[in-house]
Image: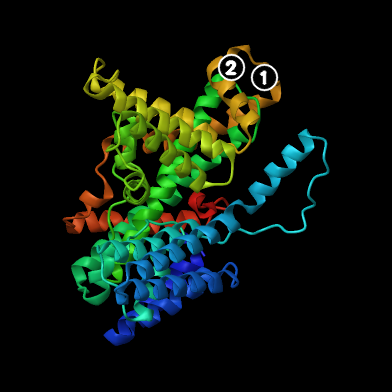
Amino acid sequence: MVFSSHIFVYYFLPIALITYYLLPYQAKHFGLTLFSYVFYGWANPLFAPLMFASTLIDYTCGRVISGSEHSRNRKLAVTISICSNLSLLGFFKYFNFGIANVNTVMSWLGLPIWQEVLYVTLPLGISFYTFQSMSYTIDVYRGDAKAIRNFIDFACYVSMFPQLVAGPIVRFSEIADQLQHRAHTLQKFARGIAFFSLGMAKKVLIANPCGKCADTVFDAGVVGTLEAWYGVIAYAFQIYFDFSGYSDMAIGLGLMLGFTFAKNFDAPYRAESITEFWRRWHISLSSWLRDYLYIPLGGNRRGTARTYVNLALVMLLGGLWHGASWNFVIWGGIHGGMLALEREQGKTSFYEWIPKPLRVIATYLLVLVAWVFFRISELPNAIAYLRCMFTGVLVHVHPSTDLIAGILYQPYYLLIMGIAGVVIWCFPQTWEWTQQLTPLRMGVCLCLLWLSLAVLATQAYNPFIYFIF
């Protein structure tokens, strides 16, 4: 089930909210957990027991860590938690990838390949809820949070449907107090509606049309230079509005339920460097990788060379977290290499000698090049696409590709691309814009929600990019 669907907006959400507010306070978490499992198991009910098993393991490990006075038991419990979560993630996300790579090597060596006797289906949101659940036991082990005693409260934290399948990654230490005591106010609920409305508008009115343009170009194979740049820019717009729109809707739904989640996007395409980009893009993931991977590896405390290695390693793993493909690793490597280079340059960075607008453009161009590897799963195809972008005049383009231009340069798609650019580089962020809701602003939000739902009824193209991660 996705947020931008009629079954969610017209049926699931109203029933869930009404039931939640009718239940007594002591039963709210049980009701929310029940609805969250229905939401999660809607596509495939077999995914629900897997999430329950992960929840039960981490809850038990948290109690052992909290209740034991022996450091050996505490280390064993946190190790079991981390290994079980990573094992689940590794098996379901990388088993097929591993077999495919083994078969490639076997084929190179002239040896018989493994037959595909087992094909593993990736459970929705497993990358998000395993990281989220794992942060609980680590926080309890470090002393950053107290172990939760009520299993239903913990199950509610792990399974909460607003941020379950595509984030933001909500750490337990950020929400522990809210699980015990939180306010349900009209002001918070109204801001939640505003967040949800703006997120829905980002998704339906901008991300979906941009995605249609991007798919048209990327699925065409060889295209001209202008169309290649058009396609990757459309994809950059799509993935931003798709994911930030989902995050806005998730934050809005959390506010309707009384929870306050942290900001997950902060105008990333306005960044003046790759370092700043990662302070603005998918903040919950970048901060998770920093606090639970980069710093434990030594961060920048073990010398310059080790710092660069840590940066590169974290981004390579971050790329692999997004998907089982070497192109994701290359995407992470590009960002990791740039992060290391910018740190090495320090205050004498090569960005410093150019004006701010050009720094933003240079950063955006680097991000666009990296997005090619993120969008295309096969390395030869990604290289071919980059060739179209940078040496398109030397590439033979079949006359039939003129049909692509007939789609891309329709006034509707050009208008959407222009609006996307204006929103990205000129408009305030949802987080700041909704802090003080005037009647006019609320009216704008409701009008956008109505328009989004009206357009949604006519759209056949409605994917969520981060559902596959």
**Residue drawn at the location 45% of the way across and 30% of the way down:** 334
Q: Nearer the viewer, residue 407 or 101?
A: 101
Mark pair 1, 2: CA separation: 9 Å
Which picture quadrant has residue 379? top right
Q: Earlier in the sequence, mark 1 or mark 2?
A: 2
User: How many numbered circles does the render carry?
Assistant: 2
Residue 12 position within the rendered picture, expressed as x and y whole percent measured from the top left? 46, 73
Occupied quadrant, residue 22: bottom left
Disc 2 marks which amino acid?
Gly
Q: Are marks 1 and 2 in contact (CB under 8 Å)?
A: yes
* Of 35 and 90, the residue lying toward us: 90
Q: In this view, does 222 lie above or below 189?
A: above
Q: Can residue 107 be seen in this view?
A: yes
The mark found on residue 392 in the picture is: 2
Would you call the spot at circle 1 few (<14 residues within 10 Å), some (14-19), or many (20 or more)? some
Instruction: Specify whether residue 259 is in view.
Output: no
**Residue displayed at 60% across by 39% down:** 377
The residue at 25%/24% (across/down) is 346
Q: Which residue type carries mark 1?
A: Val
| Element under disc 1 | loop
Residue 355, placed above or below residue 275: above
Q: Residue 397 carries which label?
A: 1
Q: Seen in the image, is 254 located left or right of residue 52?
A: left
Residue 64 found in image quarter: bottom left
